[in-house]
Image (cartoon, rainbow, N blue to C red):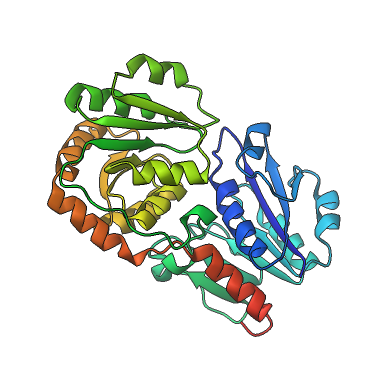
Amino acid sequence: MKVAIITEGFQRTGYGHLTRCLSIYQAFEEKNITPLYIANCDEEGKNFIPNTNLLQLNWLENVDEFLSKIKGYDIAVIDSYLAPLEIYEKIYRTVKKAVYIDDYLRLNYPPGVIVNGTVGAESLPYKKDDEHDYLLGIKYIPLRKEFWDVPKIQIKRDARSVLITFGGVDMRNITPKVLKLINDNFPYLVKNVVIGKGFENTDEIKSVADKNTHCFYFPDGEQMKRLMLESDFAISAGGQTLNELATLGLPTIMVQIADNQINNIKYYKNNKLALFAGKHDDSDLFDNLKNEINMVLRYSLRKKLRQNNKIFNGLGAKNITDILVKKKYNNL
């Protein structure tokens, strides 16, 4: 079976698509299928997808070359916020079956399979017809291999450490502000601060760090899992990392840093899977964050959040590829 995985990732937009697609790549590898990973990405982006059969190509501009690479492939998985409908239609006509990773009904996709692993995606108004099949909801959240079928953390009675993680870029410059708030109001907490390869504010983060601040530079999946397991709660954006945190059952306070996170965050909040401090540009964000930290320090609440997160098992990428390989989309 010939499989192509097609996506993008840049410092200005973030690298979440790259890691999400990496999880699907890894799940295919488990089945002895090595996909062609086509990434329109910058040099930093390549660091997020190590050990892949990578073709770094601006497939939005070099369309003919791109299509020639995937002609006749059995499956093409596309994960993009940049590609226009025209490109999707060309991919659909070039391969045997097209699979579209979607978060918020971005396009009226050509015939194929739509995958939306956002929690609550089953309730989104996708049109049901004979040309599309749907893999929707938490059963299909694609997570990196390190987060497949992992045990939930043990909740300690006293919370002494917090993980601060805002992806590979921190495009809103949230990390140093969150760190300062915690240092000023909860100085006893150990701060485990994740610094991604795309951070441009490392000096600012260092300038507000105190003796209880530990910075971790460019952690891979295994290192991220270990940091989560060693922390008592987390402060995170609402993207892929949030789903990894939930899979481990780590109590989390969410900050929305992008519009495409709103559906995920709304479902987490409404179903009491995580706490929500606000959007990155809310005037009362940091007042709310302080209040939410006081809340999550309560042992009973952290236990409840962990219990609620038992619905996550991290096997979304395997579930997706199980269906693709077993059915070959002939009978889906």
Residue 51: percent from left, percent from top: 68, 47
Q: Nearer the viewer, residue 116 or 125?
A: 116
Q: Residue at x 65, y 71 (%)?
A: 112
Location of residue 310 with respect to 328 vertically, above or below: above
Location of residue 252 with respect to 283 vertically, above or below: below
Q: Is residue 39 left or right of residue 294?
A: right
Q: Where the N terminus falls, by quadrant?
A: bottom right
Could you tell me if residue 286 is visible in this image? Answer: yes
Could you tell me if residue 144 is visible in this image? Answer: no
Q: Is residue 202 left or right of residue 249?
A: right
Q: In the picture, residue 249 is in which quadrant?
A: bottom left
Location of residue 31 with respect to 303 vertically, above or below: below
Residue 148: percent from left, percent from top: 48, 60
Q: Residue at x 72, y 55 (%)?
A: 87
Q: Is residue 184 left or right of residue 235?
A: left
Residue 145: percent from left, percent from top: 53, 56
Q: Nearer the viewer, residue 26 or 185?
A: 26
Q: Residue at x 55, y 38 (%)?
A: 13
Q: In the picture, residue 329 is in which quadrant?
A: bottom right
Q: Where the C terminus falls, by quadrant?
A: bottom right
Q: How many marks?
A: 0
Residue 317: percent from left, percent from top: 54, 63
